[in-house]
């Protein structure tokens, strides 16, 4: 039997909010699902192409306020985009992406139509840290161009990748951006201290950024990178500049994260810095 739900609010022809026996309220998205429908009427759960929960009241209010300003064709297209992201990432996405990514892409389309230029200062870090998300974001940008003829600047690919990463890790964009800002700052310190311009496309840069990202995660999880006392002494003697720079980075991390950073991180940072600055 088809499950019948009661309509609580019709947002537009393609989106309704309905009462669900288990989840209180669900958002149903489907072509024409809200056409000529009214509050209190029944609707078949099976008619929805996509369903999701908005248990967070703030997100629900944001979504309700957002929809009147978005073309209904875009809402339908967003359904295809989210299906594509889920299929490519191989997992369900956190529900908040329905609000956040819809909001972002709608404004990105407006920016592109007005030919507003902007840059994404974390583009290289995003591509290095989240290669799969970045690839899927590139595919989303291609889908938008094929469907709407709108060309997004490269910076938008980075922002979409962050939304995807947020949805698969359940981390907030604020938290992700804070970590990216810290990594960008640390890389800047390396370039200034060593008086080099690091090739952002190089394998060694990629390894350094990946290590810094994992080091930040270890700080939050209270993990150690390992006990490498003898190796630390050797590196301190062999590569004093890189070793001292590693400790400078650690102190910046400790101050910004407001957490202690394990001393063993200096060993692995020194190795990365020596390899990277030697090639530079």
Image (tube, rainbow, N blue to C red):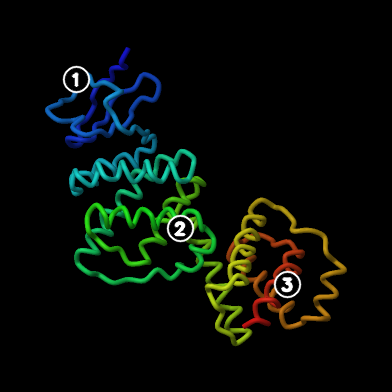
Q: Which of marks 2 and 1 precedes in the sequence?
A: 1
Measuring from the top left, give residue 253's x and y in whole percent: 62, 67
Taking the spot 69% from the left edge, 61% from the top edge, the residue there is 260
Q: Quadrant of the N terminus?
A: top left
User: Which mark's residue is nearer the viewer, 1 or 2?
Assistant: 2
Mark 2 crowd level (few <14, some 14–19, many ≥20, 10 Å Cα): many
Would you name the residue on which mark 2 appears? Answer: 134
Q: Classify mark 2: helix, strand or loop.
A: helix
The structure residue drawn at horizontal position 53% and vertical position 64%, both measured from the top left corner, is 128
- Residue 183, image x, y percentages: 56, 67
User: Please, what secondary structure does the residue beneath circle 1 have?
Assistant: loop
- Residues at badges 1 and 3 in contact (C-beta under 8 Å)? no
Residue 111: image x %, image y %? 24, 64
Q: Name the quadrant of the C terminus.
A: bottom right
Mark nearest the camera among 1 and 3 is 3
* In-image side of 39 versus 251 (left or right): left
The disc placed on residue 271 is 3
Q: Label 1, on which residue?
A: 41
Residue in the image at 55% along x and 83% along y: 197
Whichever of labels 1 and 3 marks the residue nearer the N terminus, that label is: 1
Q: Quadrant of residue 157?
A: bottom left
């Amino acid at each position: 039997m088809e499950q019948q739900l009661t309509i609580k609010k019709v947002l537009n022809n393609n989106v309704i909010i309905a009462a669900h026996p288990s989840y209180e309220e669900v958002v149903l998205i489907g072509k024409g699902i809200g056409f000529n429908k009214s509050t209190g009427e029944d609707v078949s759960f099976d008619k929805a192409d996509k369903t999701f929960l908005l248990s967070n009241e703030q997100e629900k209010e944001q979504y309700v306020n957002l929809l009147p300003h978005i073309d209904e064709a875009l809402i339908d297209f967003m359904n295809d985009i989210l299906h594509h992201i889920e299929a490519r990432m191989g997992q369900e996405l956190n529900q908040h992406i329905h609000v956040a990514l819809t909001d972002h892409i709608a404004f990105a389309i407006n920016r592109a139509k007005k030919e507003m230029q902007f840059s994404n200062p974390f583009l290289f870090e995003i591509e290095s840290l989240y290669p799969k998300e970045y690839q899927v974001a590139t595919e989303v940008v291609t889908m938008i161009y094929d469907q709407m003829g709108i060309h997004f600047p490269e910076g938008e690919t980075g922002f979409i990748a962050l939304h995807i990463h947020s949805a698969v890790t359940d981390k907030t964009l604020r938290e992700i951006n804070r970590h990216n800002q810290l990594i960008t700052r640390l890389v800047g310190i390396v370039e200034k201290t060593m008086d080099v311009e690091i090739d952002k496309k190089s394998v060694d840069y990629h390894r350094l950024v990946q290590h810094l990202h994992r080091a930040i995660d270890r700080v939050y999880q209270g993990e150690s990178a390992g006990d490498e006392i003898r190796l630390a002494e050797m590196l301190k003697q062999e590569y004093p500049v890189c070793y001292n720079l590693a400790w400078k980075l650690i102190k910046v991390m400790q101050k910004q994260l407001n957490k202690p950073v394990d001393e063993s991180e200096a060993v692995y940072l020194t190795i990365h810095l020596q390899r990277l600055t030697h090639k530079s």
